[in-house]
Image (tube, grey):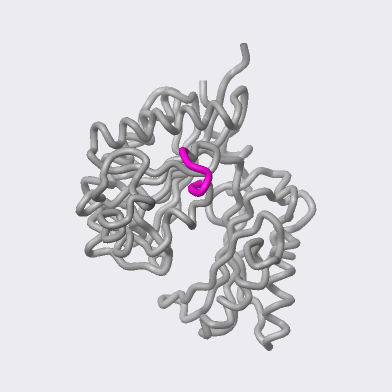
Amino acid sequence: MGRVLIECVPNFSEGRDQGTIQAIVHAMSGIPGARVLAYESDPDHNRTVVTLAGAPGAVLEAAFRSVAAAVERIDLNHHSGVHPRIGAADVVPLVPLEGITLEECGSLAHQLGERIWRELQTPVYFYENAAARPDRRRLETIRRGGFEALRREVIRDAARRPDRGGPQLHPTAGAAVVGARKILLAFNVNLETADVQIAKAIARKIRASGGGLPQVKAMGLFLPSRGRAQVSMNLTDFEVTPLEVAFEAVREEAASRGVRIAGSQIVGLMPAKALASASAQSLACENYSPEVILENRLLNNLID
């Protein structure tokens, strides 16, 4: 048998407090068979995205420990940021890389979610290929209204209650959304305007749910520290809608409104073939380096 590799890309609701960020990353480090490949934080989103990879059992253990650290240290009652969230460990996706199927990752997601509820008393929702209900495949459906709205609605609306645990959310850590999905590209385009309504209009036009680009999710945000509006995108299948197509759609929509692109940012890691037909320069990418390529990180952090 060949090796089996999965990726986990947990998103934590803390992007400002370096002590908390380092505690979370430290909690998932040093586990044989799993490696932290990268992590990055954003103060406006108030969010940290970590990329972890390795053997399934080791990755699940590392992911659980990081969720435990987040539950212990993050209080959503005192959290604010432009990115929607319902949990301290807001979303924990598992991604098949080698020798494992998406369906098998879905089963692993259920194992992880059960443990999060059992040991941390933090309720869990399952999404994408781990969804326990068809209407919960989409992350944005589960996260509608954010922590503040969801903690009220789970009490009065059975349809919004967690898949494991609850019905009440954890008083400070909310709920975790655990799932299995294909490789996703997280890509932000910053605009040379502070008008967030322009970013929101562009996002509505280009996203799949608005009749725009297939396999594209998008939202418009304002970044206080930069004084700019941003179109924040997830490309859930970059072979259907490539990176450069999404970027060009934003550029054209912005230009039609008299706004130029200030730059773009890759969030997390992406496979080499996602950039095969585009260049970082053509995407006005501010943070490109060979280190954002997933294969390079795997090679440089070879897992036994």
- Residue 265 visible in the shown view: yes
Residue 230 image position (x, y, % from top left): 54, 73
Magenta residues span: 132-136
13 relative to 262, above or below:
above
Magenta-drawn stretch contains 284 = no
| Left or right: where 223 falls relative to 148 | right
Q: Position of residue 112 (x, y in %)?
A: 38, 32
Residue at point 32%, 64% (across, down): 149
The answer to which of 218 and 144 lies nearer the viewer is 144
Q: Nearer the viewer, residue 33 or 84?
A: 84
Residue at the location (21% across, 54% down)? 172
Quadrant hosting residue 280: bottom right
**Which part of the image, by quadrant, shows the N terminus?**
top right
The foreground one among 28 and 287 is 28
**Closer-to-camera residue (53/214):** 214
> Which residue is pictured at 64% across the width and 67% down the height?
210
User: Is 15 left, or right, of 191 in this rendering?
Assistant: left
Relative placement, left or right, of 240 versus 14 is right
Number of numbered markers: 0
What percent of the width, then of the height, locates residue 249?
A: 72, 69
